[in-house]
Image (cartoon, rainbow, N blue to C red):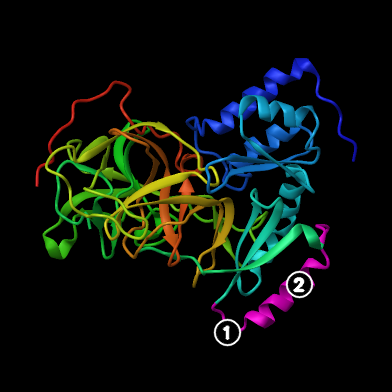
Amino acid sequence: MSIRPMSIRRLPTVMALIVAVLAVCAGPAQAAEDPRREPRSIDQDFLQMESEVPGFGGLFYDEQDRLNVFLKDTEGPEAAAFREVEPGVVIRRGDYGFAELAAWRKELRQVLSLPGVVSLEVDEATNRVRIGMDSRARTKSLDRDRLERELLFKSAPREAVVVEAAEPIRPMVNLRDKVRPIAGGFEVANFKSCTLGFNVFREGVFGFVTNSHCTARQGGEEGTRFYQNYLAAGGSFVGVEVADPDYFTGGDCPAGRRCRVSDSSFIRYDAADLGDYGKLARTVSRGTASGSLELPAKNPRFNINGRATAVRGKPLNKIGRTTGWTVGNVVATCVDVNVSGADITQFCQDVVQAGVGPGDSGSPVFSWTKGNNVKLVGILWGGGTTVFVLSPLANVERELGALEIFPKKPTRPRRPRR
C-alpha cells in the first residue's frame, strides 16, 4: 500500500491529535448509550489518528518512559511530525495500520466463545492482535488446536495474530472501618464485601458507583441494599441499587455469552450526608503488590479534579479494601475479557500490572503524580495474581449515563468521622 505524503496544512491537525493522546485526557459522557455499539476508548483515538497519519499502527511507553510509535513509513513526514512534538520518540516499523488490526479484532470476537480463550485485544506494543489462552486449563492443548482451526477461516493473516498464555480473570469479591462521610476506596457490603468506587451525581441523584457483580445479581436492577462497613462489623445501611443495565446477547457478543462494556452499578445514598463527594481515601503508603490500609492523621483524602484514560506503559493507582493502595503500569488497553467461571464477556477493558485481592472489586482507579489531586480513570472489577482489570470511566458512563464525579468548585477538606 502506498503512503501519501502529508501536506504542511495537515501538520497542525496531526500534532494536535498526538498532543491529545499524550495528554491522557478524557471528556465526560453526555448520556447513556447502547452498549452494543463499539465503546469509546483509546482505540478510537488511534483510529482517528490513523485517518490523519497514514500507516499509524499504535503507540505505547516503554520501561524508560519513552514514547514508542509504530508507522509503516519510519522516514516520512508522519514520522517527522512525531519527532517534532515528542523529542526522543522511538519510531518503530509497523507491519499493519491500526484500522486493519481493529477490523481483525472485531472479526475475531467470536473466538471468545471457544473454551480456554481468556482475552482479545489490539496490542499497541507489538502491532498485532493478541489472544490470551488460559495457561492453567487441563485441556489447554486441545483448546489451542480448536482456536488454530478457527483462525484458518478468518481474514486476519496468521502472522498478524499472536496467541499467548494468560491468567484467567476472576472477579475480586480494608480500608474496612466504618467511616462517615464515605469516600471512594472504603469497604461496602451486602452479603459480600466489595469496595466503594466513587461518589457521583447521576441525573441529580447522589450516590456511588461500584461493581455490578457486587450486587445480588450481576446485571439488572433488583434493589440490592448496601451497608458500610461490613454487617457483622456493625455496618449500617447506606444505599440501594437503582441502575445496573442488563447484559446483552447477539451482535458482537460471542455465541453463548452475555456482554457489557463495564462492570458497574449505581447505588443511591439513603441520605445526602453519607458520601464524601469528589474524594478518595488516601492511605499512608502504596506498593506494587500491596499497600497500606491505614489512613494518616493528616491528609487522609485525595481530591478528584478530572478524568484520564489508560495509556500503555503509564502508571495507574487503585485504592481497595483488601490490598490498599497499589500502583503499576498499564500493560494492555481495550481488551475483550472473559470472566473466569462465568458466561460473561466484558468488552474493551484495561489491564494494569499491580496487586489486587478478593474484596478489591469496585476500587477506584486513578492517575496521580504528586499532591492531593488525582484524575479518575475507571473502576476495578477483577484480576489474576499479578494484574488487575478495570472498566474505563467512559464505558461506565456509556451504560449508566453522564456522571458528575467532582464539584465544579473546590471544597475544603473535612476530617472523616469514625
Residue 17 rendering spot, x and y as whole percentages: 64, 27
In the displayed orientation, state which residue is furthest to the top: 9
Q: Residue at x 44, y 62 (%)?
A: 383
Q: Residue at x 75, y 19 (%)?
A: 10
Residue 138 tag number:
1
Q: Secondary structure at mark 1?
A: loop
Q: In the figure, is residue 58 to the left or right of 359?
A: right
Label 2 amino acid? Glu
Query: In which image quadrant can residue 78 be found?
Result: top right
Closer to us: 114 or 47: 47
Q: Residue at x 17, y 62 (%)?
A: 231
Whether 155 is among the magenta residues is yes
Badge 1 density bin: few <14, some 14–19, many ≥20, Cα 10 Å? few
Closer to us: 272 or 134: 134
Q: Residue at x 38, y 60 (%)?
A: 355
- Residue 255 in sight: no
Residue picked out by circle 2: 148
Residue 119 rendering spot, x and y as whole percentages: 60, 62
Query: In which image quadrant can residue 278 be found?
Result: top left
**C-alpha gap between disc 2 and disc 1:** 18 Å
